[in-house]
Image (cartoon, helix red, strand yellow):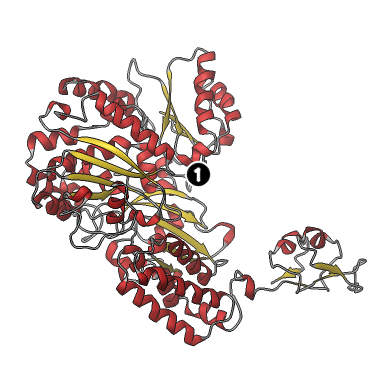
Amino acid sequence: MKTLKQLQDIRERMKANVEERKEGATVTAGEPRAHVLVCGGTGCTSGNSKIIYDNFKSLLAEKNVTDVNVIMTGCFGLCSKGPIVVVYPDGSFYTHVKPEDVAEIVEAHLVGGKPVERLLHSEKDANGQMKSINDTDFYKSQYRVVLRNCGVIDPENIDEYLARDGYKAYEKAVTTMTQQQVIDEIKKSGLRGRGGAGFSTGLKWQFTHDAPGTEKYVACNADEGDPGAFMDRSLLEGDPHAVIEAMMIAGYAVGAEHGVIYVRAEYPIAVNRLEVAIKQAHEYGILGNNAMGLGKNFDLELRLGAGAFVCGEETALLNSAEGKRGEPRQRPPFPAVKGLFGKPTLINNVETYGNITQIILNGADWFASFGTEKSKGTKVFALGGKLENVGLVEIPMGTTLRTIVEDIGGGCPNGKKFKAAQTGGPSGGCIPASLIDTAIDYDSLMAIGSMMGSGGLIVMDEDNCMVDIAKFFLEFTVEESCGKCTPCRIGNKRLLEMLDKVTKGEATLEDLDKMEELCYYIKDNSLCGLGQTAPNPVLSTLRYFRDEYEAHCNGTCPAGVCKALVSYKIDKEKCIGCGKCARGCPVAAIDKTDYVAPGHKLASYEIVPAKCIKCGACAGQCPVKAISK
């Protein structure tokens, strides 16, 4: 148990150490001369970053180097370059680090003072000078509010969170603001829910505050289930105390003394770091009775979900958290009136909570100073798909899709053309290349038939078939439907069957009109957000890529993706008779012919259509590109 004065002393004592973790920082006397930050996010952990961390610790100890601090941090964002190691204060940014590289970094850099150039993320300016990390294309357009501590602090050390003004916002709220003043500040900030719907966070807090009853709850929706989305997971892995503190502030504001974090069990690193953070907060007297000695009570517990996508819907989450089947409830009543165990409950997602402490510390006007008129602040996105730079980014609302795809993402690899971007996951829509200058905010995306969603952003290039993309997302939502309501359970299944006919070239143009009609029926009649948004990928691709649907109805897949509409053939005049295609065919569908092309010595080969499974292995084997679709 720590007194408020002791917490304040830790904050000041640790501040210099943590503030040195930036490029060009001045080393304070008595502090380490260098800080080695090793990414401990899920992506880098899968690349053995824990072994890399252990190797740094053991090798530095062997060499008796005691003035270098090694820290396991959260995600740095540039996931496609992981595992990542950053050395401060010189700012050396090492990518694709392997455990066996550690000895060289220790010997050459940490002992000898010379960075290992072959591992550096090298990006040069117009004058040929190496850019600092913050000036690289990936980072320069970003503005970190939610992710401010990720890749900076040790998420399993509460002292380091305190050094970054940790729990100062809760202290400020309880000692200088009334409950209503806290709510008014959140309202004034313009913060909207980052879980997808974009509802006013301040209004949600107000409704819960105004609900009758003395027993209330605060809940955190950490059931992130969109394919390709990992924003919430990364924040919990890199800065769990920020979410805990925000929930404490929310509890004070709405009159709740108990909080529940519902997190999917598929996030073991996030779960472990939350458990560590909650334990440390209890040990320091930050959670529990008389939290931080400020006269208010607040406690937290974790509830693990089994990974059902529908439990991202807040009422389905509440059912699951109570131990019931995870399916949505009829609304009204809304959770603010009747939520967890029938009591008024405030539910926000992880990223929404990630903004709260900074709004309280810096003020609503500060937060509202960036973003757009109706979409304030920043948004965290998980960039995936056909991009050079795949990873986690945080940008001011209103940043264009072009900036995200071409500048931050580095464009599509191998010279391919950008074709579309899917925002909002299975609930969102596809934005075509013609709308690449669209501003990324709630209203702009809704206007073009897409949505913000929780923050997944998947990029597609010219090799993607948009009909196949729509089918992929619909397959996901059909699989994840809880089955409670008929429009979603049956309607989406029928829609998927119609879409399957299109990909096989069996549909007619009239079928496309029927599909569109069914989409709107499902949207208008489904019980919860899963069913109401499930047709969005189909509707948006029908809107912007109808020519591809029509081509499928005419028996061709322009991108050459849908197997039923693809056939491979060998150009006998180009074939050199090497036989690599036949040896690489998994079903022995390629035979040798008697024909020898002019100028060649060996007989050519041909594909037997009846045996071909259209896997494309032969085209990948041919050294002279004689095989085409």
Q: Is residue 99 left or right of residue 306?
A: right
Closer-to-camera residue (425/82): 425
Q: In this rendering, does residue 188 appear at all?
A: no
Q: In this rendering, does residue 118 appear at all?
A: yes
Q: Is residue 272 left or right of residue 59?
A: left
x and y, in percent, of residue 170 in the image: 17, 35
x and y, in percent, of residue 463 in the image: 57, 66
Closer-to-camera residue (136/178): 178
Closer-to-camera residue (556/56): 556
Judged from this view, the residue extending furthest toward the bottom is: 510
Q: Which residue is mark 1?
A: 123
- How many numbered badges does the structure rendering display? 1
Q: Is residue 379 left or right of residue 362?
A: right
Q: Secondary structure at mark 1?
A: loop
Above-or-below relation of 196 to 18: below
> In which quarter of the view is residue 131 placed?
top left
Residue at the image position 13 percent from the left and 35 percent from the top = 172
